[in-house]
Amino acid sequence: MGLDELPHIPSAYAAPTEYSTEDTSFTIEGLLASIADGFREKGVAYAAGAPVELVNNAPRLLNLLPGEQGFGPISQHPVGGIDDMDWALRLGGVIPDYEPRNAAERIANRIGGELGATAVPLAAGLGRVAGQTTAQINRAAAAPSSVGQGLAAQFTRPLAVNPAGALAREGAYATAAGTGAGVATEMFGDGPVADTLGSIAGTGALATGSAASQALWNLGAAAVGAPKFRGGAVDEAVADHLMNNSAQLAAQQSATGGNVDTQSLVDALRREAPVETAVPGYRANIADRTGDTGLATLAYNVDANTPGAAITRRNANDAAVGDVIAGMTPQGNPARVRTDLQTSVDNRIAEALGLQEAAQRQFDDASQAVAPTLPTAEARGSGIRAALADAYAGAQDDVRQKYAALDSDGTLVNPQRLVERSTVTDANLAPNDAKRFRPVEAATIQEMRPGDQAPFRETGLINEFNRPIMAENPPVDQTVPLSDIMATRSGLTDDVRAARAAGQNQAARIGGQYVDDIDAYLEQALTPELQQQFSDARTARRDVADRFERPGTANAEALHTREGGAYAMDDSAVGPRYAQPDKGRLSDLKSLLAEAGTDPRAREGLADTVLADVEARGLVNKPEALMKYLGERQVLLGEFPELRQKLEAAGAASGELSTATRAAQDTEKRLTTPGRSPEASYLKYSEDRVLDSVRTVTNAADPREATRQLVASAGSPTAVQDLRTALWEEVKNRGRLSSPNATGGQRWNGRVLRDLFEDPKFSAVAEELWTDDPEDLANIKEVFSALAGAEGSSRAKAVNTSGTGQAVTGKYDPSLTTASVASRARSVNRGQLSPTIAGIDLVGTWLRRKSAQVQSRAVDQITSEVINNPGLAADLLERYNPATQGAYTRMLTQKWGVRAPTLLQLLDGLENEDPTLEALQEADWRQ
């Protein structure tokens, strides 16, 4: 078969065909099918296979050299080219081609081709953007590390900064280009020139229409006078206003010297301020979001000039803050904890008094046990002396019995030698001693001398001669009874003892000489048996004298009697004379105990003497002094262990009573005297003065310990919550602002609340009360700290000024003054202007000035809105970011009106100028 017999397959720009037989019916299905077919075949397939086709057709560039070169493509059907892509998209031919049936469907098919060719690079760009942040792409575009990175960043930047706008813009221009190209080919026939010019015309018409519509929009806004009908110029002016007032951007400009990048500011504006995190529903302004001092000043000025948006936002914020604080407010009952504290104080005082009463009863019992049985010293002394006297009498009886044994047999002795001794003793006495101290018994001894008896004695009768009648005396007896001598001796010893007791030592000495004379006589005069009896009697007598009669001893003094028989020592002195301390005359005590230690009268007297002394000294009420007293009388009390136990028990009871009494007094004073205990200070104020009560805790020397003590003292499970509520009264008192907001809502002073919880004493109380829930306290502090840093713009007024000057910026600026109208009227009257021209001039002036006014009001309105809407501010700064603003309007597939899809189709139309050869090649590939 020859070449002229091969079927004809038209290229993309085949010669015009006859449409006289075409189907002119219009259906939605047909349009959609045409668009889909063009999207696939002339769009996606062309764009996806373009790189391969460009490489494949690269040799044909040599045909541009002078002469006939004859270079063709590398391959008629390159792998991965347009045909391969289309075949793959049709699932290997499963999806059939759709042939447009009329002009409308052909135009739709052309639009689909533009959209498909545009979709491929956009999809690739979006895929690259998905793995990077806008900041990364901006940095890559500003300072690429390679050419490829820079080109990629420039291409993807519009998709990163404004993906929706880029897609909408590319879609709109693709549609316009496809429509223009489709209409042009329908009007002038298929061909690359008509297609290209039609594409350029379509995009140009869209650009012109957009500009015209914006102008008409602005004109309408000026005519209507409504700022809400604003255009991009207003948004850009507001964005510029924000950038020009930003201290951060000014610092950035100073540091880099180039265009500023608002991305960091945008990120800050889209990041919640601490107060927004802490307070749900709170909306910060741009100053709080960014912390930018320049924007804070701008916010202050704008809010002062146009406060509506700020007031609305602040009212809502006040409500949000109120809700949060209400949620944080403890739900306790301060009156309840006060009642608990009062009950605790009363119980503790009553308990202390009860212990004191118990100690008092114990002490009373112990004191009663150590009270003297004998009430007076005389009674006690009399009992001791009686016991001692009885012992003395018993000892004397024993001595008498021994001496009585010597007289029992009527022994007679010759007293001659005794008289002789006594005579010598008399002769040796000094005259004064003989007159004053010679005992009577000395004369009795002399009378025992056997004298010379007369032979006769008178009878007392007379005879008749009146003369006495004389009788013859009997023989003289030369002996005397031994009892007479012993009686004399006994009398002498009594005199000697009495003299010694009376301190008459000379008399006692002289009397003792006569006693010695008798003793010496008896030793010679008695038989050995009687001498032994006499020796025993003397020994017994000396023992009695040593025990009871030794001068200077307590026994002798207690038993000594005066003339007349009364005791020389008063009864009241007897007890103390024997109840001696360990450093006193213990011999007296021991002698009494030796003689009458078993006599109840002596023991009772001694014990009562000690008890009376303790009582007189008041030692029962002085435990330490009592113990010292007992320690000084170990010997005495060693004989009376039961007495020691009673006194020690009394001392212990006294100590316990003293301790209990001091404890009761201290407890009552501490718990009822403000300043001495947290309880007393807190309870100083009545139930309705909770704030004053709380301040006694927060102002205490150790607030934490005071709080801990109050909680422990209250002792109820609700004490902590009730004290938190009481403490919250200080929060409300300090944190509430006196004046409400514009809607009457409560306002709170965050800085005061933050400072309150940062106060060391208040914070110590709070930390102690929130020990079991530190997270709740941390949240409270976080909220108040965040509130303290909020509304920073309100603190941006100039120093030492009222801030009024910053707010006065409004000026009267009429759109058309009477002077302007009068000027035009004079020009008409003078013939300088026709009425028509003058009218047009007036309308133009009015529109121009009105537009400026509307735009100015729109700028003010949007600025006020932006100040209080960080999200809107972020959108504007991102949209008009000098670093990325060009990317917002950059066309990705179009330059100077020429679109890349159009060039791809032009390339396809120029691939082969010989339709027959192209058809043959196509047929061979299909086979």
Image (tube, helix red, strand yellow):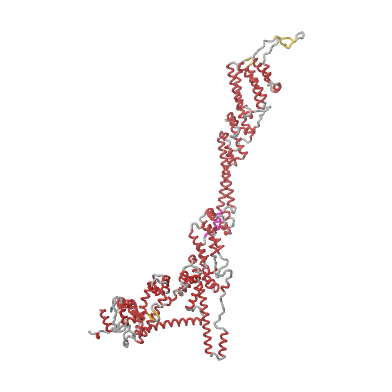
The answer to which quarter of the image holds residue 904 is bottom left
Please say if 899 is above or below 582: below
Q: Is residue 332 magenta?
A: yes
Please say if 722 is above or below 581: below
Rendered location of residue 448, percent (x, y): 67, 16
Rendered location of residue 827, percent (x, y): 56, 89
Horizontally, residue 285 falls left or right of residue 576, namely: left
Q: Is residue 350 magenta?
A: no
Rendered location of residue 614, percent (x, y): 60, 38
Q: Is residue 364 visible?
A: no
Q: Residue at x 58, y 50 (%)?
A: 668
Rendered location of residue 462, percent (x, y): 75, 10
Horizontally, residue 853 falls left or right of residue 79, namely: right
Dominant secondary structure (helix, strand or loop) of the stretch shown in magenta? helix
Q: Which residues are magenta?
A: 331-342
Please say if 41 is above or below 658: below
Residue 757 vs residue 286, the one in the foreground: 286
Horizontally, residue 40 falls left or right of residue 288, namely: left
**Residue sitting at the far front:** 66
**Residue sitting at the far bottom:** 831
Q: Is residue 147 visible?
A: yes
**Residue sitting at the far right:** 465
Q: Residue at x 52, y 78 (%)?
A: 856
